[in-house]
Image (cartoon, rainbow, N blue to C red):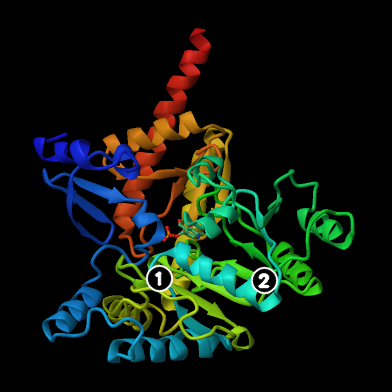
Amino acid sequence: MTATTTVFDRIESRVRSYSRSFPALFDKARNATLYGADGREYIDFLAGCSSLNYGHNDPDMQAALVDYIRADGIAHGLDMFTGAKQDFLTAYERIILKPRGMDYRLMFTGPTGTNAVEAALKLARKATGRTTVIAFTNGFHGMSLGALAATGNAGKREGAGVDLPGVHRAPFEGYFGPGVDTADMLEQMLDDPSGGIGAPAAILVEPVQGEGGLHAASAPWMQKIERIARRHGALFIVDDIQAGCGRVGTFFSFEGLGVSPDIVTQAKSLSGMGLPFALTLFKPEYDIWKPGEHNGTFRGNNHAFVTARVALEKFWHDDSFAASVRARGEGLRTRLAAIADRHGMSLRGRGMMQGIDTGDGATAARICALCFENGLIIETSGGHDEVVKILCPLTIEDRLLNRGLDILDAAFAEVLGSAAARTAAE
Ligand SMILES: Cc1ncc(COP(=O)(O)O)c(C=O)c1O
């Protein structure tokens, strides 16, 4: 570490986390490359935890934002009407909603994913007059208390310092292995007056669990969960904050799964450029808010309206970008399967959100640390941090994707080779 970084040790809180895994000083980035202040280059397989699906500093978004700022465009406008907001809404309606036959209202929440989830939970409770929300094992929905209650991870939950009520935990697909249908299990418990679950306000699910270990729900399981929600008068909420915006090869991760959520949350890559920006979408019949009932000073970031509109126009005007992501996802699967097979491990995830389950957190941490030494930024996921997870920008250059996968392959070989050598020596 250089002398300039000591200020982080002196006055920045211990709560920081990513800087522990990647203790370099970064100052520039372009697409899938991060540059250290010392000029060292790193390939980015983390992409702001899926906030940079279109890479760092996309030139078209950057130019539009610079022009907007130079022209004294409104930076902060509470939730007042602005030209930037009008243009974003028009583009979202034309490029996203209409072609998919989706009829949703857009609510700009506070700019973080967790606030979009809070709004979704509040709305479901308000619409049904019920309190219990069903959320799943390994689900991750954010750090504010309502969203944290729906989050499974014990380490995060312990930070709350208070009880986290109002959520019933149900097993995600595959939680008990392939022989147990966890949707049937949930249905039976809800049908049974002595099942112990109160009438639910909502069922909240991630189609691919981002932080919880890349468990990907199948279409039949998602359809069953939706049907259960409807049968029990609960709203069906999809948290698309990490898996959405193209990450799995479609704009919404639930497209193609045969479901139609009542509420959808979006954040992360929605702004296109890493700016804070979040949305809660819901079917028009649930637009029952009183004005200002879910308020916030930073709802609707006008700079993000500008870049998000450019992202929609540039990447989503037709299916070519999505098709390229799907093709790259196939290629990624082939490469990862080869690594996983070599070490007797299994693959997780879908599209450009895949990883390898190493079986334990210590192994995954050693692999990621070695990757970082060799210029690749990559993180873990899962209840035990046991999955090495690839979340590179969807726009990554082929050369860098392959180079990053070579570094990853070598790190698996070195860490697992030395682990095998240690076991043999013992
Ligand atoms: C699925 C999901 N929901 C909600 C959140 C919370 O978003 P934020 O960190 O912007 O509050 C995350 C963050 O990783 C997430 O992956």
**Which of disc 1 and disc 2 is earlier in sequence?**
1
Q: Amino acid at mark 2?
A: Phe
**Residue 166: % across, % down:** 65, 58
**Residue in front for this viewpoint, 341 or 216:** 216
Label at residue 236: 2
- Residue at numbered disc 1: 110
**Residue in front for this viewpoint, 165 or 34:** 165
**Residue in front for this viewpoint, 390 or 222:** 222
The residue sitting at 26% across, 77% down in the picture is 303
Q: Is residue 271 left or right of residue 106?
A: left
Q: Is residue 381 left or right of residue 130?
A: left
**Quarter where residue 209 is shown:** bottom right
Number of residues whose C-alpha sits closer than 10 Å to that of mark 1, classed few (under 14), some (14–19) or many (20 or more): many
**Quarter where residue 305 is shown:** bottom left
Can see residue 288? yes
Q: Amino acid at mark 1?
A: Gly
Label at residue 296: none
Vertical order, 343 against 119 (above or below): above
Number of residues whose C-alpha sits closer than 10 Å to that of mark 2, classed few (under 14), some (14–19) or many (20 or more): many
Which tag is nearer the camera, tag 2 or tag 1? 1
Q: CA distance from mark 2 to mark 1?
A: 22 Å
The residue sitting at 54% across, 37% down in the picture is 384
